[in-house]
Image (tube, rainbow, N blue to C red):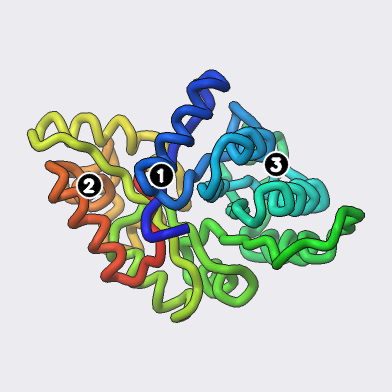
Amino acid sequence: MGATGVWTRMDGFSVGEAVEFAQRVEELGYGALWIPDAFGRDPFAHAALLFAHTKRLVVATGVVNIHLREAQATACAQRELHDQSGGRFLLGLGVSHQTAVEPLFGKPYPKPLPSMRAYLDKLENAMWWGPKLDGEPPVVLAALGPQMLRLAGERTKGAHPFFAPPANTKRSRELVGPTAWLCPEQKVLLESDPARARARARLAMAGPLGMPNYRKNLMRCGFGETELDEGGNDRVVDAVVAWGDEQALVARVQEHRDAGATHVCIQ
């Protein structure tokens, strides 16, 4: 995947715009394009489209919601895309949030760790009537807490932390192990005026700051709960969103690498 990738929502793009965007990401030298699994374009079908129009770009899911998709269906889609792309598909899996699963899907939110363990078991043991694959299709977990990070290191290629500062990358590396892939997402904003940058950053942070798993993780990183309210104080904003000139953004990506990241995906 290389050292750097791009994380973005492509739901609003036309098919032509999506293809052009993926090709531009590849031309610029990024190793991977990360796409979410939410309420727009299907990430598996969309990945197939992008593979047909790129040559080396990895397409990664950031991330597939295990409460939304049965493991057997996910396994077949993963293996099909692995075969179709010549090994360029990376399956990222996550447990989502209680505030999303219960009201949107109308089902109780189960305990995250046992749910992910059971899903990985089903994924590994899923039936596959397709051809013998060249290599094992890779998986990473959207891991934030200590137990999920350890599980990521034990059962998958590694972890894809989201909405977290470089301090979290350092802690994650210690927990996930020395050889695992560690692929944090980093929000970047090319804006050097502090007031404008922080105002724009808070718009991007509004959704994640209302989700319990992200809030808990920022508190693990040393932020007080009151600092996270009302869009986050300046200290939180500056930790989560890299803003400034090109040099400042490059420096933040390097902070993640210095903390143990193997791949940083900018949003």
Where is 115 relative to 98, above or below?
A: below
Mark positioned earlier in the residue sequence (1 or 3): 1
Mark positioned earlier in the residue sequence (2 or 1): 1
Front disc: 2 or 1: 1
Mark positioned earlier in the residue sequence (2 or 3): 3
Question: Hey, which residue is sitting farthest left in the picture?
Answer: 193
Under tag 2, what secondary structure? strand
Look at the image and tell me whether residue 93 can be seen: no
Q: Which residue is at a point 47% across and 28% down the rendered structure image?
A: 20
Give x and y (percent) for residue 162: 42, 52
Question: Hey, which residue is sitting farthest right in the picture?
Answer: 129
Per the model, the C-alpha gap separating discs 2 and 1 is: 14 Å
Q: How many marks?
A: 3
Give x and y (percent) for residue 213: 47, 52
User: What residue is disc 1 on?
Assistant: 6
Residue density around tag 3, few if under 14, some if 14–19, many if 20 or more, within 10 Å: few
Under tag 1, what secondary structure? strand
Q: Is residue 53 left or right of residue 244?
A: right
Per the model, the C-alpha gap separating discs 2 and 3 is: 31 Å
Tag 2: amino acid? Ala
User: What residue is disc 3 on?
Assistant: 68
Give x and y (percent) for residue 81: 70, 47
Front disc: 2 or 3: 2
Where is 3 relative to 231, above or below?
A: below
Residue 242 is marked as 2
Give x and y (percent) for residue 214: 42, 51
Could you say which quadrant of the image residue 166 lies in?
bottom left
Question: In this view of the protein, which residue sits in the foreground, 227 or 9?
Answer: 9
Tag 3: amino acid? Leu
Q: Which residue is at a point 53% across and 49% down the rendered structure image?
A: 56
Q: Is residue 144 left or right of residue 253?
A: right
